[in-house]
Image (spheres, helix red, strand yellow):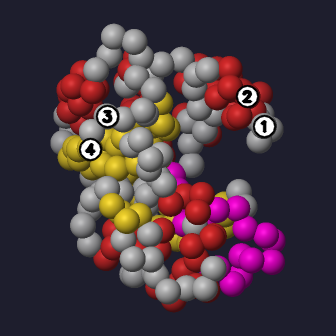
Amino acid sequence: MSYSRFAIYYVPAEGALADFGAAWLGWDVARGCETPQMDVPGLHDVTMTPRKYGFHATLKAPFRLADGRTVADLDAAVSDLVTGLAPATCNGLDLTALGGFLALTPDGDMTDLRRVATACVRNLDMFRAAATDAELARRRKTGLSALQEALLTQWGYPYVMEEFQFHMTLTGRLPQDGFAQWSKAVLRHLPDLPRPFVLDQIALCGERADGRFELIHRYMLTG
């Protein structure tokens, strides 16, 4: 399988949370296949935007490989990186309205999760091809702060380092009057969330020819 872009995600291990995410979105990123979507009226439309990425949290946003770099090189670098990274912990995960959509976000201090994400962004950046003018323009359409603009210029993505927000997206952008309805729908199907939440692995994922992402390899954090 050849991939147009790569990303470093947190993808839940097999279990109730992973099963929920796959069935909620209708795409199983871990297996790289469609899965029967939950029978919730309107769910197909409201999950159209996040579906192709699968149920995940972004640690290093999708990027094209730099010239001269190979997937094998990237795999080796991630394998090396995780030997120096300890697992990250927070109190748990909560359902949150975030930037116009619903997501699972950390309860409590996110410093430990940010440590892992920062290491992924910084240590793997030599594999990222420079963002194109079109990619930069698309990011800027959302209206960036001065700090976010600086981060975009340096790292190709504005929501890294100090601006990083761990989140596992569950919907596309919702109208203001849709949050209560969809929050109730999520909570009716959401399994018990882990408390504490431990991020003990990261995943290299690739964007397929059909635009959907799938897991290539998992790596345990053993630092």
Residue position for label 1: 141
Residue receiving disc 3: 2
What crowding class fits label 3: few (fewer than 14 Cα within 10 Å), some (14-19), or many (20 or more)? few
Instruction: Check the image and name the residue furthest to the front.
Output: 210
Q: Amino acid at mark 2?
A: Ala
Q: Is residue 199 left or right of residue 182?
A: left
Q: Which residues are magenta?
A: 166-183
Do callouts 2 and 1 mark residues in contact (Cβ within 8 Å)?
yes
Q: CA distance from mark 4 to mark 1?
A: 31 Å
Q: Which residue is mark 4?
A: 216
Q: CA distance from mark 4 to mark 3?
A: 11 Å
Task: List x then y, in percent, for residue 25.
Answer: 48, 68
Residue at point 24%, 67% (across, down): 14
Q: Residue placed at 47% from the left, 52% from the top? A: 53
Cα gap from disc 3 to disc 2, whole angstroms: 27 Å
Q: Which residue is mark 2?
A: 137
Residue in the image at 23% along x and 30% along y: 75
- Examine the rendered structure and indicate whether residue 7 appears above or below residue 22: above
Per the model, the C-alpha gap separating discs 2 and 1 is 6 Å
Within the image, what quadrant is residue 78 found in?
A: top left
